[in-house]
Image (cartoon, grey):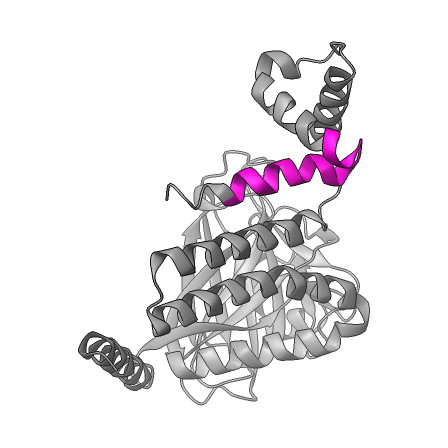
Amino acid sequence: MKTTTKFALGMIVLLVAAATIASQFVKVRLVETQIGKYTTNAGEIVRDVLVGQTFVAQKDDLSGLSVMFATYSNRDNTQLVKLHVREGLSAKEDVRVASVSASELRDNQFHRFTFDPIPDSKGKTYFFFLVSPESTPGNAVTVDLNTQDPYHLGSAFIVKDQGSAVTDPATLAAAGKPTIDVVFETYHTVTAREAVWTKAQGYARTFIGTWDEKKSTYWLWARLALPAVLFLVCVGLIRRHTLSLAVWLPILLLAAFFMRLWYALELPLTTDEGNYLYDAWTLLKGNLAGGDGYVKAPLVVAWISIWQFIFGHTILAGRLSSVVIGALTLLPI
């Protein structure tokens, strides 16, 4: 093994080790609960209006909440919107408070409120609510809701026209909407290592859970990725055996050709492709078609006609013209 190769491998090992150690100490916010679709909204959040949601924290260090707001087609709303977080519906004291100007919100988009992590939050039921005491009709935002009851561990609460009693526990208890949920997300502060592991588990569960439904899509991804993997293996073997230019250049050329051919066989036919095929076939018969291919790319039309002369008036003939010329770009590179 060459000294440079040993050095490169050593650097890779050191970087991986450093990243592994750092991941134990670096903190990131990880999204946990996600309710992402809306079916309606709660109406303008003006004075004496409250919109809230109960939820169960899935991890310790709850440190953020995202809420999907609607701004009435990005209307110029200007007042402050406040988020209050309490430990349970009956609590009268806030554990965290955050705010945002309505002018910073976008229509049917999430806005994330961040705050200091709440330790020992795992498994506890929390209640967050939004108010905007200074907003008035025509200068207010609203919150998107889902009426299909997507979140079974909590529900939405909407209070209107209750004056100063808008946050009273008794008032809130009567304002529950058991089959409605606010469109929201929860965030928890975790180590980078835990975030990566959680994401990997999530992708694995999604892959397994959607296999029957998206099997054909996954197989398509695999077929498209395989040529790239084979090409990288080919390059690795060439570097390992230090073959001469006269040997490895044809190998790479063949790999480039078959990679493109593999992909070309999966492509659907497009209108432009059909036009060029028709122009080339007409040219081969000694006539000029009525299309604009001769103005845009006359050499392309002529090049395709050569391949049609060999393989006939087929889609593959036209694509082989592109596959070959694309693979040949490897030579000057």
The answer to which quarter of the image holds residue 150 is bottom right
Q: Position of residue 94 (x, y in %)?
A: 45, 74
- Residue at 44% over, 46% down: 330
Residue, far front? 246
Instruction: Report how many numbered discs are placed on residues in the image.
Output: 0
Q: Is residue 9 above or below residue 228?
A: below
**Quarter of the image that includes the N terminus:** bottom left
Q: Position of residue 42 (x, y in %)?
A: 68, 53
Side of 163 where 194 appears, left or right? left
Magenta-drawn stretch contains 320: yes
Magenta-drawn stretch contains 90: no
- In this orientation, which residue lies closer to the viewer: 96 or 215? 215
Side of 52 where 13 appears, left or right? left
- Residue at 53% over, 71% down: 186
Q: Position of residue 194 (x, y in %)?
A: 44, 83
Side of 58 where 120 appears, left or right? left
- In this orientation, which residue lies closer to the viewer: 165 or 65? 65
Q: Is residue 64 above or below residue 61?
A: above
- Residue at 52% over, 81% down: 198
**Quarter of the image that includes the C terminus:** top left
| Prevailing secondary structure of the magenta residues | helix
The answer to which quarter of the image holds residue 218 is bottom right
- Residue at 77% over, 68% down: 215
The answer to which quarter of the image holds residue 207 is bottom right
The residue segment tinted magenta is: 309-327
Residue 237 visible in image: yes
